[in-house]
Image: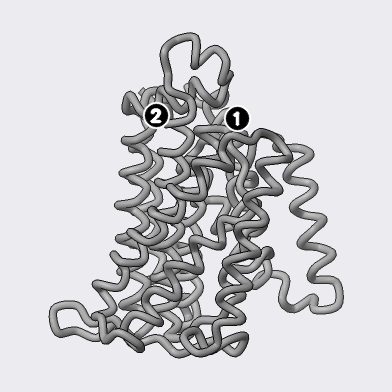
Amino acid sequence: MAQRLLNHRAFGLLVIALIIAVAPLFFPSTFYYRMGTAIFIAALAAVGLNVLMGLAGQVSLGHAGFYGIGAYAVAVGPATFDIAPWAAIFIGIALAAAVAYLVGRPILKLRGHYLAVATLGFGILVSMVLTNEGTWTGGPDGMGVKRLVLFGYVLKDRAAWYWASAAVLLVGAVVAVNLIESPTGRALRALHDSEVAAAVNGIDVARYKLVAFVISACYASLAGSLAALSDAFITPASAGFLKSIELVTMVVLGGMGSVIGSIIGAAFLESLPQLLARMQEIEHVLLGLIIMLVMIFMRDGLFPTLARRFRRAAP
């Protein structure tokens, strides 16, 4: 019975939903609501990136570019074109999907480090545009973002954003889990194992690569929009190289191909600096050391390794 529960994908999501619901009972201050919101938003972007990297086996080092597109859509849209923030979220997703489609068609023909460099170039290009287009984006100093209004209620306090971002993350995770179990998900897994074998079996490799790229871009755009709206401010750093590396690290740390792993990886990477904050002089050294140790002793990632060990111990 325990083995069947552990092997069911929905079980992990139910546990995470329970933790999200219970955690506020133990929050000593509103700061923890803000930290929870940051974790949920980062996890949403990581879940989307895992569709591309863990499921389809394609590398992206410029995924923060799509994150930045979503973030600036909800900033520029209301400020310049008087678009409602909630509508700007969907415009950002559509724009990110269109850009992913146009950019993905040529660069996804590349493989290995060539693909990594191409996606890196895309991320740098988006960051440069956002930094230099000062008239619309505020330049390197960034710009303010109008508050999101839903059903007459202005989302501005930390508790409200905690629950809103948690709800979006859970919906996004459910969609990703269903995608994995769908015919598209099986095609992507086949592509991950061997592109040649997938093509021999009638799978349109180029098409499914592009599908994974567009889906992951939509997740990143949505996460960027939520981050900008929750903070009410955004800068080009949201689309920078370090943000892309942070997202990739979350995916790899949590476990490639695991939706639950993406959430755990995001929680680990977002919360660890806060836990090490008191050790200011060696904080970054300890952070790097811990990440190295995790990757050395848990090569498959945090969640797959711990889940496998728990299954062995379960009756």
Q: Is residue 250 left or right of residue 150?
A: right
Query: Which of marks 1 and 2 precedes in the sequence?
Result: 2
Residue neighbourhood size for the residue with mark 1, other residues' Cα within 10 Å, grouped as few (<14), some (14–19), many (≥20): few
- Displayed quadrant of residue 201: top left
- Secondary structure of the residue carrying tag 2 is helix
Residue drawn where x is 48% and y is 25% of the image: 205
Q: CA distance from mark 2 to mark 1?
A: 26 Å
Residue 172: x percent and y percent?
34, 51
Residue drawn where x is 42% and y is 18% of the image: 203
Q: Is residue 26 visible?
A: no
Q: Is residue 141 left or right of residue 168?
A: right
Q: Give the residue pinned by disc 1.
A: 309
Instruction: Kindly give the residue lying farthest to the top in the view shown.
Output: 200
Residue 186: x percent and y percent?
40, 23
For this rendering, which residue is in front, 220 or 177?
220
Does 20 sit above or below residue 146? above
Residue drawn where x is 46% and y is 51% of the image: 100
Q: Are marks 2 and 1 in contact (CB under 8 Å)?
A: no
- Secondary structure of the residue carrying tag 1 is helix
Residue 216: x percent and y percent?
45, 48
Does 179 sit above or below residue 186? below
Does 277 sit above or below residue 124? below
Q: Amino acid at mark 2?
A: Gly
Q: Amino acid at mark 1?
A: Arg
Residue drawn where x is 37% and y is 23% of the image: 4
Q: Give the residue pinned by disc 2.
A: 185
- Displayed quadrant of residue 27: bottom left
Q: Is residue 206 visible?
A: yes
Does 271 sit above or below residue 264? below
